[in-house]
Each structure stands twice: as C-alpha cells, then as structure tokens.
Image (tube, rainbow, N blue to C red):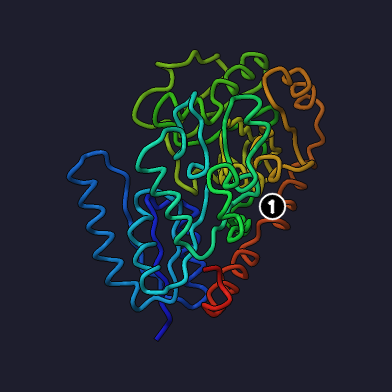
Amino acid sequence: MAAKVTLVYSLRNSFVQRDINLLEQLGYRVETIASPPDKNPLKFFANRLRECALSLRYLPQSEALVVWFSDYHSFVPLLIAKLLGRKSILILGGYDVVSDAENQYGLFYRSGIRRIMARQNFKWVRQLWAVDESLLTGCPTAAVQNGIRSGLNTFAPDQLKKATTVPTAYDSSFWTKKNHKKVPKSILTVGLFTDKRVAIRKGVPLFLELAGQCPDFRFTIVGEEYASLSSHFTFPPNVTLYPKASPQELQKQFGTHQFYFQGSRVEGLPNVLCEAMLCECIPIGRAVFGIPKAIGDTGFLFTSSNDFPALIKFLRSVDTQKGIAARERMIELFSIAKRAAAFEKFLQTTDKNTHA
C-alpha cells in the first residue's frame, strides 16, 4: 500500500493542485483537507472542527503533513502533526509574511490572533519553504516604495534556521505557445480581480496608465470577478476586459499575446507570469519580491510609472527572440523535477535529521 501524505490548503489554486499531482506521481497517496476562508462565525468554527477531525483521521497514517500558507487553516493540523511526531512543511506563498497597511493586505498588517497563530505555526513546523528568497529576507524595494514590511526575518527571525527557498514548478509541456500566433503590440495581464483592493495590489492602475500612453497597442485584462473593474477605474479604449479563464483559455491568451505585464506591489512568485513566459510572452514586471527572479534578463523590470518612457521604448524596439529566452529561463529554473527532488529529500529524511 502506498505511503500517505496529508496536504492542507485554503483554496485549491493551480499551484496546490500541481503539488497534489506531483506527490501522487512520486507514489504517495494524498489525503487533502480543504478549508476555504469564511467570515461567517458558524462556518469559521465548523472549518476548525473539520480540520481537527480530518487531521486526527489522516495524520496517524501519514508520513508527513504539507500545508500551503500560514493562517487559521494551518494551526490545528500543525499542532496535531507536532503531537504525533509527524514531519511537516509549511509553504510560504507571500500573504503569510507580508504587512501592507496601505492596501490592508498581509497576515501581519494588523495585530491580533492571526499574527499570534502564524508565529506559533512557524514554531511547530519542521521545515518552512518559501516560493522566493524575498519571502525570507524581505523585499527592500517594496519597503522603500510603499512601506511594505515583509520577510520571515522581519516577523519571526528565530525561525529562519528551518527555512529554505523551494520555488513552485510549472508544466512546460502544457504551458507552451503551440500553434498560436503572437499578435504584435499586444499586452496581457491576468489575476483574480475580486475587488478594487486586489486590482490595486495586482497593478491594474499601472496597466491602465501604460495603456493610456500606448494607444496603438492592444491591452487585455483577464480575471474580472464579482464586480466590474470599470466601476472603479477609467478604461482607455484600447483595453479589453475578460472574466476568469480556464487553463486552456489562458494558454490561448498567452500564446497570442506578445507581452505579459506583472505590475503587482506584493507577490511571492507569480504563477501567471511564469506560465506566460513558458508560452513565450516577453515579460514586463515590477521589480519587487519574486518578479525579478522570474524575469531575469529576458524582459523589462520597472519600479514605478516613472520608468514608463524607457519601458515604452523597450516595447517598440524589443527583440522578439526574448520570448524564446523567457521560456528557456522558466524551464531551467522552475522545472517540476527540481520540486519533486525537494519533496523526495524531505519525505525520505528520517525525523532525527529534520528540523525540530
């Protein structure tokens, strides 16, 4: 019978599903505990009870516990894993080591029980995996520009000894341009834009400002949810808005657009940026958190709209081979094989050699 691993998450995002698939490919049976965020008090406590019941059911038979993000949903499973002596990984994705007071974002932007629980989660877990080094050391550019405090060394420096950087991984066989044809002067950005604050955090105002300065370019936004972004922002006529798309639809959008824009003020390692680069989009990104690591020298990095004159010059004169270089960079740095090796190393290490 296959060995078991329990994996806990709040939302079943694409990166969570990839880890489930990866662990199964390594021969493990994956038991999952899903705890979607809910502000309703009854549902909130029901989630905590459910986490407790499922943890007591799954963890005694599991080799290890894997948890995506530190928050309420992490607390009970990590406590039970600690009491049972099970190995555990807590994966830091960005939100859980950030304080962005201006945009009211991040687990540490306000004091309270969540901050206390987060620090306790860090103590109980055997290993902390960050998707980018900036989530451990902090991002000085974001601090200077927007007063954003970040990094494990800021909020729990005593836990750095158990932390390491393990980037997310991407399927280069699926995320590929295939037979799609790049449309010249086309720029895309993608996110789950559920409200105005999310849109600001993901850089929509910068995207619209750039669109206004490049009227001969076609700009596309994919990911509008719930409320219309047009009720909060003024859209230039060269901007097209689409709702949330399936992976197959996204692959087509990536394949037909020449550039991809990631203007976020806070990120870990942006999945859509990496997927777009695999589809040979030439990347444009704000030089914060994991964005510079992803882009490297294959695109254009900016710090604010003050850099737009240089960016526009880049857009009009760029070597189209940059898209191929972007794909090659993704394959080299963020392969599934590298993340699989990290999981195998952790799962095959005996308790006495893991972090206590």
The residue located at (67%, 17%) in the rendering is 214
The quadrant of the rendering that contains the N terminus is: bottom left
Q: Position of residue 237 (x, y in %)?
A: 54, 14
Q: Is residue 112 left or right of residue 212?
A: left
Asked if 94 appears above or below 73 in the picture, the reply is above
How packed mark 1 is, by other alpha carbons closer than 10 Å (few <14, some 14-19, many 20 or more), is many
Residue at the spot of label 1: 330
The residue located at (76%, 17%) in the rendering is 309
Asked if 272 appears above or below 51 in the picture, the reply is above
Q: Position of residue 305 (x, y in %)?
A: 67, 19
Q: Is residue 332 left or right of residue 200?
A: right
Q: Furthest-bottom residue in view?
A: 1
Frontmost residue, 67 versus 224: 67
Quadrant housing residue 31 = bottom left
Asked if 21 appears above or below 38 in the picture, the reply is below
The residue located at (44%, 28%) in the rendering is 104
Label 1 element class: helix
Q: Is residue 200 visible?
A: yes
Asked if 315 appears above or below 250 in the picture, the reply is above
